[in-house]
Image: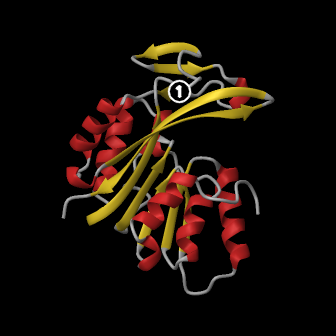
């Protein structure tokens, strides 16, 4: 294996609580990294597609999936910058959409455009999973402020120096989802995750908001 081996713990909870182990379909992850989240779906027979801008991550994902030697289950990893949209690289429709902590690297208007565009690639009744950083994350305020709750980071310990990070409140995220994706409000689940992490020998405080639910059908 190259990179992370196990899926995000909340992606795992989402997977089983939504019965993804009892069916198959097409799943898309935006900001897929080395494919560790998608590997869970793949092991249960899902067709997986991952998009990431990092060529090393894409190569790692291809390496990891090739090593599994499953037969008859398609997978595809696409090198593409999410800020350039999706229509150039996607053609299928998906039953699950995963966007774990990747929209935070896009300015708000681009993040909203991406969400709206992604909604055109999901089937009616599809599930979505979204996570983003909150204003309580230790990165907040670390760097040059370039917009509301938006900073050009100087956090060398996370390897994110020079990257944009946008931080969200629960209200903002719910509002953005309602405007960009036709969500079924009765299915929306919201979790606040605050925890300590070790970065380059330093203990830091991470803060994420996680949402999952279903597209209206």
Up the image or down, 138 lies above or below 95; here it is: above
56 and 124: which is toward the camera: 124
For residue 29, side relative to residue 177 (left or right) = right
Q: Position of residue 215 (x, y in %)?
A: 25, 58
The residue lying at 70 percent from left, 54 percent from top is 4
Q: Most extreme residue toward the right, as rendered?
A: 201
Q: Position of residue 161 (x, y in %)?
A: 66, 25
47 and 141: which is toward the camera: 141
Q: Most extreme residue toward the left, as rendered?
A: 217
Q: Secondary structure at mark 1?
A: strand
Q: Position of residue 169 (x, y in %)?
A: 37, 28
Residue 93 in view of the camera: yes
Up the image or down, 75 lies above or below 50; here it is: below
Q: Most extreme residue toward the top, as rendered?
A: 144
The residue lying at 54 percent from left, 26 percent from top is 137
The residue lying at 39 percent from left, 17 percent from top is 148
The residue lying at 43 percent from left, 78 percent from top is 22
Up the image or down, 132 lies above or below 48; here it is: above
Q: Position of residue 81 (x, y in %)?
A: 51, 45
For the N terminus, which image quadrant?
bottom right
For the C terminus, which image quadrant?
bottom left
Residue 35 in view of the camera: no
144 and 39: which is toward the camera: 39
Quadrant hosting residue 171: top left
For residue 119, side relative to residue 160 (left or right) = left
Quadrant hosting residue 128: bottom left
Label 1: few (<14), some (14–19) or many (≥20) C-alpha neighbours in 10 Å: some
**Mark 1 — residue?**
164
For residue 70, side relative to residue 27 (left or right) = right
73 and 9: which is toward the camera: 9
């Amino acid at each position: 294996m190259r990179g992370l081996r196990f899926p995000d713990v909340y992606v795992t909870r989402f997977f089983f609580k939504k019965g993804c182990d009892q069916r198959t379909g097409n799943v898309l992850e935006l900001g897929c990294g080395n494919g560790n989240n998608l590997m869970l779906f793949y092991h249960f027979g899902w067709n997986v597609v991952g998009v990431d801008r990092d060529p090393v991550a894409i190569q790692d994902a291809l390496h990891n999936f090739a090593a599994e030697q499953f037969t008859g289950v398609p997978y595809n990893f696409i090198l593409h910058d999410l800020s350039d949209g999706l229509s150039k690289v996607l053609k299928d429709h998906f039953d699950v959409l995963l966007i774990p902590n990747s929209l935070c690297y896009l300015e708000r208007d681009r993040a909203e455009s991406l969400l709206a565009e992604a909604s055109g690639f999901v089937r009616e009744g599809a599930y979505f999973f979204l996570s983003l950083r909150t204003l309580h994350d230790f990165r907040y305020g670390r760097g040059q402020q370039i917009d509301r709750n938006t900073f050009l980071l100087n956090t060398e310990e996370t390897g994110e120096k020079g990257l944009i990070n946008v931080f969200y409140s629960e209200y903002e995220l719910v509002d953005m989802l309602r405007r960009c994706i036709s969500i079924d409000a009765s299915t929306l689940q919201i979790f606040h995750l605050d925890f300590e992490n070790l970065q380059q020998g330093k203990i830091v405080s991470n803060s994420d908001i996680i949402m999952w639910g279903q597209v209206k059908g």
